[in-house]
Amino acid sequence: MVASMDWLRSLVLAVALVTLAAIPALPQEATPPTRVALVIANGAYPDAALAQASTQGRAVAAALREGGFDVVAMENGPRADMRQAIAQFAGKLRPGAAVVVFYSGHAVQQRDRDFLVPISPNPVQDAVDLDEVIDPLIIAKPSSALVLIDASRDNPWQARGKGLRATERLETVAVMFTAAPGKTVADSGPRGNRAVEEWLKAIRTPGLEMAAAVERVRDAVAKASGRSQQIWLSSAPPKGLVVTPIGQPVAMAQANRAVILSPPSSDTSPDAFELAFWESIRNSENASEYRAYLDSYPNGRFSALARAREQLYRGRPGAAAASAARPPAAATPAPPAPKTGPIRDCSDCPELTAIPPGSFQMGSNDLYEFEKPIHPVTVRGFYLGTREVNFEEWDRCVNEGGCNYRPDDRGLGRGKRPVTDLHWNDANAYLAWLSTKTGKRYRLPSESEWEYAARAGTTTTYPWGQTVEKDRANCLGCNDQPRRSAVTSGQYPPNAFGLYDMAGNAAEWVADCWSENYRAAPRDGSAHVLPGCRERVLRGGSFNNDPRYLRSAARFKYEADVRFYTNGFRVAREP
C-alpha cells in the first residue's frame, strides 16, 4: 500500500503506526487464548525437497505446545491448507497475546514481497503472501510476537532476487530470517538448519526471554559458520515472550493439541442462485459478465459455454470503435434511465440510489503509479446501494440459504453495521441470491462506476474538498476520537448523490481485476476483467486507514478468495 508496493502493504504500515485499539473477545469465550502459535513446515517438494523441514516443524510445534501455546500446525500442504491454517490461527489471536509463528520451507520474491511456497504442481502461482501471516498480527496487536521464517534457500522457482526481502520494522512483531535479506544458505540435509536447532535449544530454556534466545542463536550461528551466515531480525521481540516458563509442566499436548488441516471440500452442483446468475447474463455480449459467472461458479453447469462466450466477445477486434461509428438509426437503444430517488426492490432489500449517466476524469497523477494516468470515462445510469450492505441484510441471505458464510462481528454487534470479513466471491453469492429474490439484475459496481459515484460531480481530492475535514468520514485521522471499527451508516454526511460512507467505514469490493495502471482501462464504465485473475480491486478505504486512502481516486487490491476484517461491499443494479 505504498507507491512501490500496494494498498495492502500500506495498510500494514498504517495500522502499525497508529496503534489499533483492542478487538473485543468473542462473547462465547470466557477466557481467550493468550499464547498462540502457527507452525507450517513444507519439505516434500518434488523438485527441491528439504529433508528436515517436517521433522524440525514437528519439534517446534511440540516445544510450543509444551510451553502452553495453542498451536495450529500444518505439514506439507497445498495452498488451500496453508491459507486455512493461517485463517484458523488468525481467528485465535487476541490483543495482548504472546505469539510465535514458525515457517520452514521454500519462499520466492514476487512484486517486491515475500511469498511462501506450498506443495503444489504450480508452486510459484500458488505461493502465499507472507503479508497474509503478518497482517492479522498487526491488527490483533499482541504484546510480543516472533515470526521465524526458515526459507532463505536457493530454489528452482526464484525468477529474480535471492533469498528473502526485508520486512519493515513493526510494533510488537519481530520478524527473523535464518539468513540476511538477499542471501541464501544451502539446505543442510539430514542434519537440519543449524539456526533452527539453536533456536529450539534456546526456547526450551526455562524463563528465557525471546530476545535473549534470538541473540543466542545469532552468536551460535555466526561462530559455527565463520560469520558467513548471519541471522537477520527486523527488531528485538518485546519483553514477555517466553516459550518455556519457569516451572512449566511439559505435558500439555492434550490440552493444546495441534490442529492438522485437510483441504476444504467444494460442492459444485448447480442451484437456484447459479441458475439465476446465468439467466441474468445468458444473452449478454459482455465478456466480463461471463468471467464474473466463472469466478463464482468455476465448475458450474454452464462453465464451458461461459468460457466460450468470454473468449468470443473478448476477442472481437474493434468492437468499441465499431459501436461508436454506427449511425444513430442503427444504434442500440439506450438503456432506461434509473428512476430518481431512493428505492427498494423488497422491504428488506438494500436501499438503492439512482446514479445519473455522465462523464468524468478518473484517476490521479499525484501519488501512486497504479492511479495513473487520469483518463476520461463515460458512465451510463445505474443504481448503487445508498449504504454498504449490513449484517442484518447479510444474515438474511445466510438464513435463506443464499450465502453459506456467517462472518464474526468480533463482539461489536450485527444489525445495521456494515458486514465485513467477506471476500469477493462472498459478495457475488449475495448478489446472485438478491437477483433471484427480486428478479432484478444485481452485481458489483465497476471500479469506474464506483469512482464516478464517489466523486458525485466533484473534481477535488475528497468528495467534500481538497483537504481532510473533521467528522466527514470514519477513518484514522478523520475525527478527534477514532472509532476503530465500522459503524452504522448515517453517522457522517452523504455525498452529493446521497451515498453514505463512500469514504471510510468499510473497504468495498468492486468488479474489476487489479491492474498496475490505467493505460488499458475501459473508458465506457465497464469493469476491467481478465481470465482467471486472483486479485480484485477494493475502493473507499476503511476505518483503520489514514485519510490518504479515502481519496476518491484511491484504490487497492486483495485476493478474491481471502477474507479480511475491514472488507465489505455495496450493491449495484441495472435500471
Image (cartoon, helix red, strand yellow):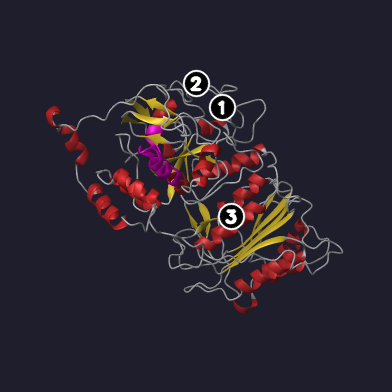
Kind of residue at badge 2: Trp
Evaluate if marks 3 and 1 touch, with contact meaning CB atoms under 8 Å apart: no
Regarding residue 372, the answer to whether it shows in the image is no
Q: Which amino acid does label 3 sit on?
A: Ala
The earlier-in-sequence mark between 3 and 1 is 3
Give the residues in magenta: 429-451
Location of the C terminus (image quadrant): top left
How crowded pointer 3 is (Cα within 10 Å; few <14, some 14-19, many 20+) is rated as some
Q: Which of marks 3 and 2 is nearer the N terminus?
A: 3
Can you name the residue that lies furthest to the bottom here? 190
The reply to whether callout 2 and callout 1 are in contact (CB within 8 Å) is no
Q: Position of residue 137 (x, y in %)?
A: 65, 49
Residue at which label 1 appears:
473
Rounded to the nearest whole Å, what is the CA distance between mark 2 and mark 1? 10 Å
- Left or right of 14, for residue 66: right
Q: What residue is disc 2 on?
A: 464
Q: Does the magenta stretch include residue 434?
A: yes
Residue linked to disc 3: 87
Residue 411's disc number? none
